[in-house]
Image: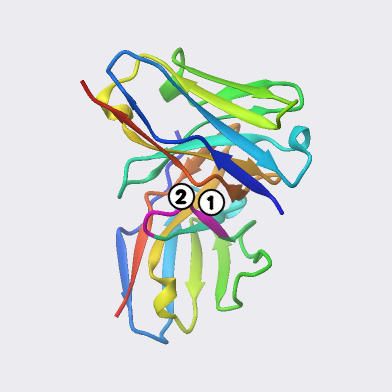
Amino acid sequence: QVQLVQSGAEVKKPGASVKISCKTSGYTFTHYVIHWVRQVPGQRLEWMGWINPGNEYTQFSQNFQGRLDMTRDTSTNTAYMELSHLLSEDSAVYFCAKDNGDYFDFWGQGTQVTVSS
Amino acid sequence: SYELIQAASVSVGLGQTATVTCGGDKIGNKNVHWYQQKSGLAPMVVIYRNNKRPSGIPERFSGSNSENTATLTISGVQAGDEADYFCHVWDRTTVVFGGGTRVTVL
C-alpha cells in the first residue's frame, strides 16, 4: 500500500534552516510529483511547491521564492523539503503529498516545525 | 492570483444534509477536489475532479461544479463526518486551496 512517512518534529531558531524528509513506498516514486503543503493549526492549507522525482524539476510558490528547496533521493524513494531563513511565522505543520494527476491522493502524517528563540 | 472562498463553518443535524460551497471566478471551468481533515490528522481526499469518489469514500459524499460555485454535499451526515473540508484547484501551475469549512454535527 502507498505510504508517505515524514521525519519527526523540529525546533529551530529564527534564521536557521529546516530540512524535512518524506519517505515513500508502495508505488513507483519517479512517476508521481510530490507536493509540500503547510498549515498553521486551525488555519488554511498553504501550498509551497512540488518536485518531480523523475527529473528533479521543481515549481515553488512565489511566497517562498529564494528560501525554499526541494530535492529527492531515488535510491531511497525519499523527497526532501528545505526552508531557510526561518521566521516565527514559519511555525506550522508541514505535509508532503503525492500527486495523482491533479489531486493529492496520499499524504504524509505531517511534521511540526517550531521556530522560536 | 486566483482565490477560493469558503464559509468558515456549517452546522448540520445528525442524519441531515450538509452543503459546503467553494466560490471562485469561473470555477466551473476547473477541476475541483475536496479534502476532509479531522483534528490533528493529515487531509484526505473525499471528492476529486468535481464529482468522483475515491474507493473507500461513502456514497453520501458527492460533488458538483458549475459556473462560479463548486459544492460538496454530505447526505445523511454522521458524527464521524465532523471535520474541516478544503477545496482545491489548479491555477495554471499553482495549487490553490480554499480557506476551509468546519462542519459541525449537532
Query: Which residue shows up at 74% across the image and 47% down it?
Result: A26
Q: Secondary structure at mark 2?
A: loop
Identify the mark at residue B27; answer none if there is no mark: 1
The number of callouts visible is 2
Q: Amino acid at mark 2?
A: Gly
Q: Is residue A92 above or below residue A44?
A: above
Say if residue B30 shows up in the picture: no
Query: Which residue shows up at 61% across the image and 60% down it?
Result: B50
Is the stretch drawn in magenta largely helix, strand or loop?
loop
Label 1 is found on which chain of the structure? Answer: B
Task: Please give the residue where the numbered disc 2 appears in the rendered image.
Answer: B24
Q: Is residue B103 above or below residue A113?
A: below
Q: Is residue A113 above or below residue B23?
A: above
The one nearer the camera, A9 or B72, is A9
Q: Quadrant of residue A64?
A: top left
How many other residues sit within 10 Å of disc 1, few (<14), some (14-19) or many (≥20)?
Answer: many
What's the magenta region? B39-45
